[in-house]
Amino acid sequence: MRHIALTGNIASGKSTVSARLAALGATIIDADVLARTAVAPGTPGLAAVVARFGAGVLAPDGSLDRAALRARVFRDEPARRALEAIIHPEVRRLRAEAVAAARDHGAALVVSDSPLVFETGIAAQFDGVLLVDAPAAVRRERLVRDRGLAPADADAMIAAQWPSTRTRPLATWIIDNDDTPEVLQQRVDALWPTLVAAPPLPSGAPATDISR
């Protein structure tokens, strides 16, 4: 079984690539789903979040109000790091359980969909990292047009993440999402045989960019 990471900045098209990989037969482990599970009602994770940030981050039904929490930590780096210290260990534990289950079920390719592979220093845990990238101006336009963000908020979200100039040299494979959805699907399909069949690349090998 091969276990690779799928990463990319906000509005890069990572979710679209993940969906296409799933359609082709990959087993997807979504970090966002794991993060929600880590702070579900009744979990130690949610209790730790409330202890750190107060009951104001809870919805009326006792679940985590993700929008309220995001507002608390978005422009507060120490608060964001405190939140990550709570959630990331739980996400790692849940991912390990999901990978073990996929291996038991005979999965050939497991893809961990995670936006923070490089930032959290876990890239070496995978057989390779697939980066989905798009120019910052394109991602800004998508955030404003498709998600209804104010331009200033879109700029702040983009600025809070590592730029692609920093992540591209670290990736094993790169797919640029700077064209139509149809072209993006073609690029994923073109890379699929390599993801399934090729052995892991040696550490430090140059990334394969199949976007052209």
Image (tube, rainbow, N blue to C red):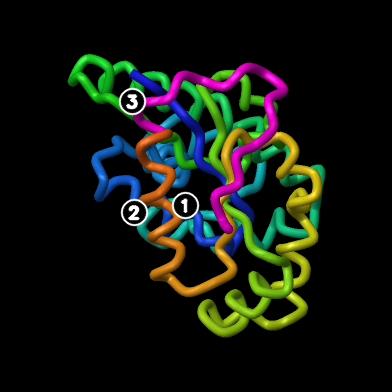
Task: Name above or below for residue 182 compared with residue 30.
Answer: below
Say which of 170 and 65 sits in front: 170
Q: Amino acid at mark 2?
A: Ala
Left or right side of 164 for 62? left
Tell me the element at label 1: loop
Front label number (2 vs 3): 2
Q: How far apart in space, not on screen, are marks 2 and 3 (Cα)?
A: 18 Å
How far across and down, in percent of the image, does residue 202 sit?
Answer: 62, 17
Residue named by callout 2: 19
Task: Name above or below for residue 187 compared with residue 113.
Answer: below
Front label number (2 vs 1): 2
Badge 1: residue crowd in 10 Å (few <14, some 14–19, many ≥20): many
Question: How many numbered circles does the render carry?
Answer: 3
Q: Amino acid at mark 3?
A: Ala
Image quadrant in which the C terminus is located = bottom right
Q: Is residue 54 visible?
A: yes
Q: Which residues are magenta?
A: 195-212
Counting residues from the start of the chain, the first of labels 2 and 3 encountered is 2
**Picture residue at 50% right of the left edge, 25% below the top:** 92
Residue 64 tag number: 1
Tell me the element at label 2: helix
Residue named by callout 3: 98
Badge 2: residue crowd in 10 Å (few <14, some 14–19, many ≥20): few
Image quadrant in which the N terminus is located = top left
Q: How far apart in space, not on screen, are marks 2 and 1 (Cα)?
A: 26 Å
Front label number (1 vs 3): 3
Q: Amino acid at mark 1?
A: Leu
How far across and down, in percent of the image, does residue 178 sit?
Answer: 59, 68
**Picture residue at 39% right of the left edge, 70% below the top:** 182
